[in-house]
Amino acid sequence: MVTRVTCAPVPPRSLPFPPMEAELVNELPEGDGWQYEPKWDGFRGVLENVGRELHLWSRNARPLLRYFPELAELGERLPPRSALDGEIVVVRDGALDFDALQMRLHPAESRVQKLSAEIPADFVCFDVLLWDGEAIHKLPLEERRARVEGLPFSVSPATRDVKVAAKWLDRLDVAGFDGVIAKRLGLPYLPGSREGVVKVKGEKTADCVVMGVTWSEKGTGIASLMLGLYDSKGALRPVGTASAAGKRREEIVSRVQPLLGKNPERRPRGEPSRWRPQVTLEWSPVPPKLVVEVRYDKWQGQRFRHGTRFLRFRPDKDPSECTVDQVRPRPKKGDPTVERLLDAAR
């Protein structure tokens, strides 16, 4: 069967949409009323077959199938009037590769076809919304999960054992995951709601060298600290930023200002923002003398995935001790891989 790919502007009204969301919390909820799942680090997608026309919607109702043409073959396994909730991911060497996934969003059709062969994506299902016309989304989570486990797709694992979830939270970052999701049992699918789902990210701390500051848009105040870590060759590499706002601002400015001097050199910070091209952001380097401890949620590639949170200065620590080794996930024997997790769900 040949699946015809179409790109409609909005999902049909029969589809429960937008997808359920998750509230960020600090700890895994405990008790008998929860189901736990790994938090996949990819693009959220709702895969839908309407009258033999396959769609892949983003959480913002944007059509994604044109960027991932290799997923069109999934339409052969999805009956008409069916829809699944899941994640588009790229797997390399047993781990999720979000950087490679982002490369797939290319406007040129020729490039899209080339990348689909070189960096193929997969769709991992974790909920079923419609199946052959049946409104599965109205069923409680535990009944929907039973349906998910019987689907002919890659399926995300799930457990009701908080100890298993805690192990996932501790070690899944090695495989590129982004934390753990907890869903309340007994609830139907709640489109666009955060009521029935929470997410926990395994936050960690790191000691980094202050290698510069960024300036506010008006250029009158320090906006953030630019963080660096030494690589294996002894070179100081930029790895992210920590905001200089908040209760500790006076302390941050008092420590950094003497290193900047009266007339600090100002350099353009990267390319102009495509959202605000009229704004030119600037940064100034400082001698690598200060060490700060920051909290972060994920290390990706060669930098912190998101912004970090300043915790304190570390005058007891020498800058040369701040190396990439402290943040790079270190595999251990028996660590989970994407393949093992998917096999466990079958």
Image: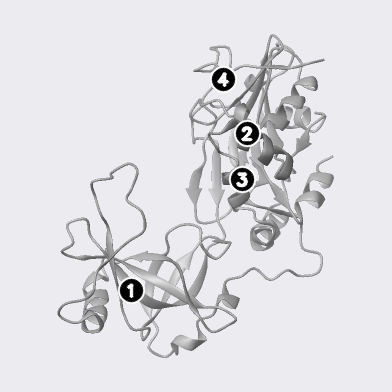
Work out whether residue 112 or residue 307 is closer to the camera in this orientation and state it. Answer: 112
Residues at discs 2 and 1 in contact (Cβ within 8 Å): no
- Name the side, left or right, on which 193 lies relative to 87: left
Categorize mark 4 by other alpha carbons within 10 Å: few (<14), some (14-19), many (20+).
Answer: many
Q: Name which residue lies at 57% across and 18% down.
A: 7
Categorize mark 2 by other alpha carbons within 10 Å: few (<14), some (14-19), many (20+).
Answer: few
| Nearest to viewer (mark 2 / mark 3) | 2
What amino acid is labelled 3 in the image?
A: Leu
Q: Name the residue under label 4.
A: 16
| Nearest to viewer (mark 4 / mark 1) | 1
What amino acid is labelled 1 in the image?
A: Gly
For marks 2 and 1, give the CA distance. 41 Å
Residue 61's x, y, as percent? 50, 25
Work out whether residue 156 or residue 29 is closer to the camera in this orientation and state it. Answer: 156
What amino acid is labelled 4 in the image?
A: Pro
For marks 4 and 1, give the CA distance. 47 Å
Q: Mark 1 points at which residue?
A: 212
Residue 30 visible somewhere in the drawing = no
